[in-house]
Image (cartoon, helix red, strand yellow):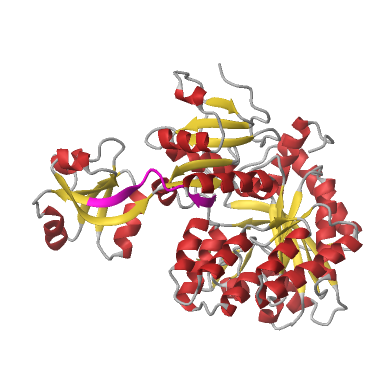
Amino acid sequence: MSVEVAGMGRAKADGPLKLAVPRGALFGETLDALDAIGIDTAELRGESRSLIFEASGITLVTMRPSDVPTYVEAGAADVGITGKDVLLEQDDRVVYELLDLGFGRCRMVLAGRRGDAKLGESERRLGMMRIATKYPRTAQRHFESTGHQVEVIEVKGSVELAPLIGLADGIVDLVATGRTLKENDLEVREEIVECTARFVANRVAHKLRAAEVDELTAKLREATG
Amino acid sequence: MVIHPIPPGTRDVLPDEMRELRRLHLAMIEVFEGRGYGEVSTPAIEYDEVLARGDGRTAASAYRFFDEHGDLLALRSDMTVPIARLVASRYADAKMPLRLCYLANAFRAVRPQRGQMREFAQAGVELIGAPAPEGTAEVVEVLEATLDAAGLNRAVIGLGDADLYRQLLTELRVEGEAREAVLGKLAAHDLVGLEEELSSLAGIGDEQVATCMALSQLRGGREVLEEARALGGDAVERATARLGETFEALEARGVADRVQIDLGLLRDLGYYSGAILEVYDPALGHVLGGGGRYDGLLERFGIDLPAAGFALYLERVHVAQAEEEVRGGGEEA
């Protein structure tokens, strides 16, 4: 069911370079970018439930975007693609950020209920805002750097729910088109940072497989630039 | 059964592992002693003030506490600073160069679930009173012999220059906060951020941004020195000259083959100057250790001597050793 990969376990493969491919929102554009540099992704686009694919001299490993820094830092994957939002949230992970791929563009924003003064009122009267988010560290850092006191509440699912039923005064979340916010009667109050997909590399792979990593970086730069 | 916890990031070692660690330890010490490096031991706790003298910003201990007299003590975060203290106090009039080695536990704050420990063992050497390039070359030679003794004959040593970017930024007149920001991006190897940071600075042209970016990606054999030189500038010229001299000294000793010149190397300990080293093995995704020159460190302890050294993380070397064994040892990479 799965492809045999050389050097499993802790060991890094001496075989093909392993590239961590993010499933989810970045999946389609990542595959397009890989196609553009001559890596055949037809198998990944199919119905296969496999997680590991061999394609054009490279091993593609599919995973959640938020797992990419974990695999790449440990060297289980040599290189990977994930969103800047993930890298910001896991900024203690040591991975080399080599390239801004430009796609998957979205904004990390602070949003509150439309026409609702709750955010400001909570801060004025209660000393802090309650903020629900899937990005607690990014949110905490942002409010610290802008001098606001907040109580960050981490949630895993639909963040939009939190201010609607009173868990939080506002949310910090990623917005691509703004449709989800609109449909839930939320509006952007503040832009925190713009995020795109990034190409990252393991620290050791960047040194020991320099030629392959550089070639891949150059090709991706050309294809997405 | 009652489980009594120990702090996260610390661990017990049981006999099977201990036997292997001991074997590794002995193999390493044998290399050190065989090359005239005498083993020393220093206290795990020191006065905080003494450790901070070494490098207040980055090497400062995460674990500090008061003793019964109200003095502030700290657990050491590496061995280089305690040995600098020891040399200044005990060997100020000794005949140089001085060769010391150690296997000791050091303590750092860790982020959870990262395969890092709060308490970890380091094996390393310090060569005091031998300037670049010969002193650096000797240290690299000992490092290679140590890696061989550990069975890591595929390991690679990265050789960079700690002063390259400091001097380059001075040349480009990047100072103050901007300088720290740029160095921070370089140390984190965030190239996207580095390019943004540099491009946002007034007085830095596109060409200079491109130079910095290209430099940070230059790594390989001798040829990268030429490639770097082609990018121009005094700072690059000086750094490549230093690296070239070191590389020649390594070639003369016949130990240049496993050295990768790396102009993007930047170690986060603040006391390094000139040559810096990092050790990689293809069997492990983490760096095995590092080192370099710290010609200014002993001066902070009142004795002005050039110095260089390296430290390997014993547990990581052990993991890499186990992986290499699984792989079948002597096979070609």
Q: Closest to the observer: B106 or A202? A: A202
Q: Which residue does the image show at 61% across and 61% down from the upper left? A: B214
* Bounds of the magenta segment: A96-110
How many numbered marks, from 0 up? 0
- Vertical position of residue A109 compared to residue B165: above or below: above
Q: Quadrant of the C terminus of chain B?
A: top right
- Vertical position of residue B256 compared to residue B271: above or below: above
Q: Which residue does the image show at 64% across and 51% down from the upper left? A: B120
Q: Closest to the observer: B207 or B80? A: B207
- Vertical position of residue B233 compared to residue A76: above or below: below
Q: Closest to the observer: B322 or B79? A: B322
- Vertical position of residue A40 compared to residue B70: above or below: above
- Residue B264 location, x and y as percent? 63, 60
- Residue B194 location, x and y as percent? 50, 62
Residue B85 visible at all? no
Query: Predominant secondary structure in magenta?
Result: strand
Q: Is residue B319 magenta?
A: no
- Residue B109 location, x and y as percent? 53, 56
- Residue B256 location, x and y as percent? 84, 57
| Residue B283 relative to residue A95: left or right | right
Q: Which residue does the image show at 53% across and 44% down from the upper left? A: A220
Q: Quadrant of residue A40?
A: top right
Q: Which residue does the image show at 60% across and 57% down from the upper left? A: B107
- Taking the view exactly as shown, the residue that stands out farthest to the top is A1
Q: Is residue A108 magenta?
A: yes
